[in-house]
Image (spheres, rainbow, N blue to C red):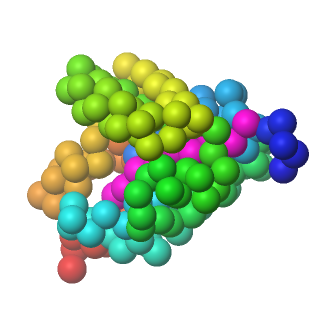
């Protein structure tokens, strides 16, 4: 990376990665020179998949994007304050997706706190594509848990992992 490159960080739990996440990643690639997908361990949320499983799923899904995009993408786990991780990966921009007004309220607070911790790192919000506005990992897991089809909400490989996990 050169000093003039804009490094973006798209953080989240990605439990699991959804088509909405993929959409935000594709769009973020248009505005940064290098993109880091930060997979938060976030044990407090009680994730369905381990951090390693979530990293592997994200890597598999972004691999194809990286082959067609000119923007390098890396996936990294983290278990620390977001701003400390952003500084570690030398991010200039934090990318966040917004689906609804409730997302905005939460993200507005987070952005204020993050700016207080490091005013040099900007936060950029990308509105979810209308096709993905209702898609939340939490809802996808619930649908899968009760045997519902999740194929329209997540990539095919992720849908299979959900079916396999809940078949146990």
Does residue 128 appear left or right of residue 22 in this picture? Answer: left
Which residue appears at 84% of the width and 50% of the height? Answer: 1
**Residue 112 visible here:** yes
Viewer can see residue 133: no
Residue at horizontal 37 percent and vertical 67 percent from the top: 41
| Along the line of sight, the residue nearer the viewer: 121 or 55 | 121
Horizontally, is 83 left or right of 104 in the view? Answer: right
To which quarter of the image does residue 70 belong?
A: top right
* Residue at the (67%, 50%) spot, across then down: 90
Q: Quadrant of the C terminus?
A: bottom left
Farthest-out residue, left: 146
In this rendering, is residue 141 above or below 68? below
Task: Name the spot of residue 123 as percent of width and height, x first.
Answer: 50, 31
Place of residue 18 in the rendered image (x, y in percent of width and height, measured from the top left):
40, 46
Q: Residue at x 57, y 63 (%)?
A: 76
Q: Is residue 86 above or below residue 164?
A: above
Residue positioned most to the right: 2
- Taking the view exactly as shown, the residue that stands out farthest to the bottom is 168
The main secondary structure of the magenta stretch is: strand
The reply, left or right, for residue 162 in relation to residue 12 is left
The percent position of residue 89, horizontal first and vertical second, equals: 64, 56
Q: Is residue 55 above or below residue 29?
A: below
Residue 9 colored in magenta in the image: yes
The number of numbered discs placed on residues in the rendered structure image is 0
Name the foreground residue: 16 vs 79: 79
**Which span of residues is magenta-colored?**
6-15
Question: Which of the two residues, 93 or 134, is positioned nearer the viewer here?
Answer: 93
Q: Position of residue 93 (x, y in %)?
A: 59, 36
């Amino acid at each position: 990376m050169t000093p003039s490159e804009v490094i973006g960080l798209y953080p989240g739990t990605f439990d699991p990665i959804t088509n909405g996440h993929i959409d935000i990643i594709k769009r973020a690639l248009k505005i940064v020179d290098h993109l880091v997908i930060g997979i938060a361990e976030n044990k407090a949320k009680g994730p369905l998949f381990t951090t390693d499983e979530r990293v592997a799923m994200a890597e598999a899904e972004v691999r194809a994007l990286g082959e067609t995009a000119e923007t390098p993408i890396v996936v990294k786990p983290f278990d620390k304050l977001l701003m400390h991780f952003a500084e570690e990966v030398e991010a200039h921009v934090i990318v966040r997706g917004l689906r609804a007004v409730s997302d905005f309220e939460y993200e507005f607070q987070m952005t204020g706190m993050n700016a207080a911790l490091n005013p040099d790192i900007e936060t950029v919000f990308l509105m979810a594509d209308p096709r993905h506005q209702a898609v939340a990992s939490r809802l996808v897991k619930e649908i899968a848990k009760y045997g519902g089809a999740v194929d329209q909400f997540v990539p095919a490989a992720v849908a299979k992992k959900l079916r396999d996990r809940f078949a146990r």
